[in-house]
Image (tube, rainbow, N blue to C red):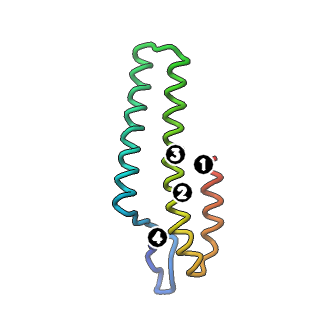
Amino acid sequence: MHTEEAENGNGPSCACKKTERPDELKRSLSSRLARIEGQVRGVRRMIEEDAYCDDVMAQIAAARGALAKASIVVLEHHMKHCLIDRVRAGDDGIVDELIDSISRNL
């Protein structure tokens, strides 16, 4: 769930945001990111070994796709937990934050 430190005892503050994720989600994302790291190391190795450009670009596209999927997993958790919790608490500003976040990631 999404937690924030209170500012002057008057409710949530945007100064310190943190999202607590379930252990299973953390393991899943960590595993996914480890595979992505391996893909990126492979691309570096391909460059060092003068691999054919089209093959390098295919591997870069695969790594980008994997990162995009990881982003979707984080976004899904954010929407199902952080967004809903804050809207229920009366904080509609989270919707604008989400729109900005999605805009940066498109």
Q: Amino acid at mark 3?
A: Lys
Q: CA distance from mark 2 to mark 1?
A: 10 Å
Q: Relative to 48, is 60 above or below?
A: below
Which residue is denoted by mark 4 in the rendering? 2
Numbered marks: total? 4
**Residue 48 location in percent, x, y?**
40, 17
What secondary structure is marked by label 3? helix
Q: For this rendering, which residue is in front, 69 or 94? A: 69
Q: Relative to 50, is 10 above or below?
A: below
Residues marked 3 and 2 touching at CB (< 8 Å): no
Q: Amino acid at mark 1?
A: Asn
* Mark sitting on residue 105: 1
Residue furthest to the bottom in view is 9
Near mark 1 (Cα within 10 A), the count class, few <14, some 14-19 or many ≥20, is few
Residue depicted at x 34% and y 60%: 23
Depth check, mark 2 against mark 4: the one in front is: 2
What secondary structure is marked by label 4? strand
**Residue 24 location in percent, x, y?**
36, 58
Residues marked 2 and 1 touching at CB (< 8 Å): yes
Q: CA distance from mark 3 to mark 1?
A: 12 Å
* Mark sitting on residue 69: 3
Q: CA distance from mark 2 to mark 4?
A: 13 Å
Residue depicted at x 38% and y 29%: 41
**Residue 90 location in percent, x, y?**
60, 81
Q: For this rendering, which residue is in front, 99 or 16? A: 99
Q: Earlier in the sequence, mark 2 or mark 4?
A: 4
What secondary structure is marked by label 1? helix
Q: For this rendering, which residue is in front, 27 or 37? A: 27
